[in-house]
Image (spheres, rainbow, N blue to C red):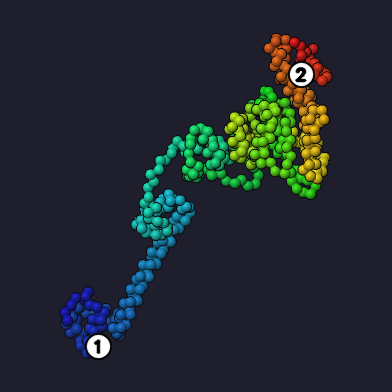
């Protein structure tokens, strides 16, 4: 039996060792099978005393051990790859593509192996989008989101539509999400973000209205709210609307009633409450072409006129009265005067309550004097400016509509 040592099976090796055990000399066995004595003693140390069945079991154990080592090595490699990208979020297909590319470069593995470790589908990894990038729309969307930082994609969709950019709302939502412009829900105390452009002071009636809500409770603990609307120039209280719920549609309805009787304002100012930032107010502002200004969050002093009115109303009425029902609140706020049929509380505030900024005259006369001065200034006989009239000057007497200014200037001289 003449063969190379590398071709000897375990059964043949055991047969050679059995010949030596039968009494053959080592030199004769080596010469017969063409092996060296070193090889013979190496086989004897490894397979001495074994049967053919024992050798087969040893071979099976070695193969199994090799497979287990390979599986362990692969598992350790997968574990190392997963730890490397554990801090990354792989929610979108783009993020998965980036993770697979990183693993292929860092660990020199195939695409199949990287996809298997991450549990990603190879078809999605190989996919290349053919959509346009919409760079212009994305840029404008980022600009609007920077100005309207609390607007979601729905309200930004309305602003884009005003500018003539027509787009399906689902596509806009995708672009909005890809640009990472999502608005997080605020928790805790509101704080001002960034700087806002200051508003110019109004120079006439109906140039700017302020809106705000007051909150109070009935005797049984139930809550109710009051919508207050004030003209920032004349300080007139235009409306007081009490109810247990005042959504945006109700605010729009009350504004329409006011505009029908008084005229349209140039601007409305409010805080960032959900009733005043909803779709109903945005749609109404667009249809009526009334500019709506939101103050900075956490800065009520930017809406100082309505806050001052709220303080007086709370101090003079809400803190002094224990309300039992909504009808009780309406009777306290909105009883009608038999002569003018105007709400007594609003009539008292506009006709009786004085204001230091107006030279201690009431709001309705400021509005009347403003209109009268504008009408007579063109005749050349009344050169008294309103700003000096009610801020620097002090009225000497009042009498129904006969008002005399300092230095004997007559406001009604024709």
**Residue labelled with disc 2:** 393
The one of 387 and 167 positioned closer to us in this rendering: 167
Q: Residue at x 72, y 10 (%)?
A: 381
Horizontal side of 163 relative to 291 (left or right) equals left
Q: Residue at x 54, y 44 (%)?
A: 182
Residue furthest top as drawn: 380
CA neighbours of label 2 inside 10 A, class few (<14), some (14 to 19), many (20+) = some
- List x then y, in percent, for residue 98: 41, 50
Front of the two marks 1 and 2: 2
Horizontal side of 24 relative to 191 (left or right) equals left
Residue furthest bottom as drawn: 23
The quarter holding residue 369 reads top right
As helix, strand or loop, the secondary structure at mark 1 comes to: helix
Q: Residue at x 73, y 41 (%)?
A: 243
Q: Quadrant of the N terminus?
A: bottom left
Q: Residue at x 74, y 28 (%)?
A: 236
Q: CA distance from mark 1 to mark 2?
A: 134 Å
**Residue labelled with disc 1:** 21
Give the number of callouts.
Answer: 2
């Amino acid at each position: 039996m003449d063969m190379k040592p590398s071709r000897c099976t375990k059964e043949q090796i055991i047969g050679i060792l059995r010949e030596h055990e039968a009494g053959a000399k080592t030199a004769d066995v080596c010469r017969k099978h063409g092996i060296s004595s070193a090889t013979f003693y190496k086989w004897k140390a490894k397979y001495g005393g074994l049967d053919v069945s024992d050798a087969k079991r040893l071979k099976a154990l070695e193969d199994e051990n090799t497979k287990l080592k390979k599986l362990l090595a692969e598992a350790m490699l997968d574990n190392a790859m997963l730890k490397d990208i554990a801090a990354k979020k792989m929610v979108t297909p783009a993020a998965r593509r980036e993770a697979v590319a990183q693993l292929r470069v860092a660990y020199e593995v195939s695409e199949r192996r990287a996809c298997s470790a991450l549990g990603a589908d190879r078809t999605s990894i190989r996919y290349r989008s053919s959509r346009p990038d919409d760079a212009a729309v994305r840029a404008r969307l980022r600009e609007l989101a920077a100005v309207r930082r609390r607007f979601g994609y729905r309200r930004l969709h309305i602003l884009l539509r005003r500018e003539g950019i027509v787009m399906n709302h689902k596509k806009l939502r995708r672009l909005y999400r890809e640009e990472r412009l999502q608005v997080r829900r605020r928790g805790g105390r509101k704080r001002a973000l960034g700087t806002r452009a200051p508003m110019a002071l109004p120079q006439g009636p109906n140039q700017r209205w302020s809106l705000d809500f007051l909150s109070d409770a009935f005797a049984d603990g139930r809550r109710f709210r009051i919508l207050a609307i004030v003209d920032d120039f004349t300080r007139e209280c235009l409306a007081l609307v009490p109810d247990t719920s005042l959504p945006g549609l109700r605010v729009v309805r009350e504004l329409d009633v006011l505009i029908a009787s008084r005229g349209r304002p140039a601007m409305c100012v409010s805080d960032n409450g959900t009733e005043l930032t909803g779709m109903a107010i945005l749609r109404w502002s667009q249809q009526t072409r009334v500019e709506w200004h939101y103050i900075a969050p956490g800065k009520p002093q930017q809406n100082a006129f309505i806050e001052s009115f709220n303080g007086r109303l709370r101090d003079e009425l809400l803190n002094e009265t224990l309300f039992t029902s909504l009808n009780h609140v309406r009777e306290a706020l909105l009883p009608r005067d038999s002569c003018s049929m105007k709400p007594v509380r609003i009539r008292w505030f506009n006709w009786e309550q004085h204001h230091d900024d107006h030279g201690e005259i009431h709001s309705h006369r400021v509005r009347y004097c403003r209109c009268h001065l504008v009408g007579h200034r063109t005749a050349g006989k009344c050169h008294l400016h309103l700003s000096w009239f009610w801020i620097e000057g002090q009225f000497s007497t009042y009498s129904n509509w006969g008002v005399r200014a300092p230095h004997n200037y007559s406001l009604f001289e024709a």
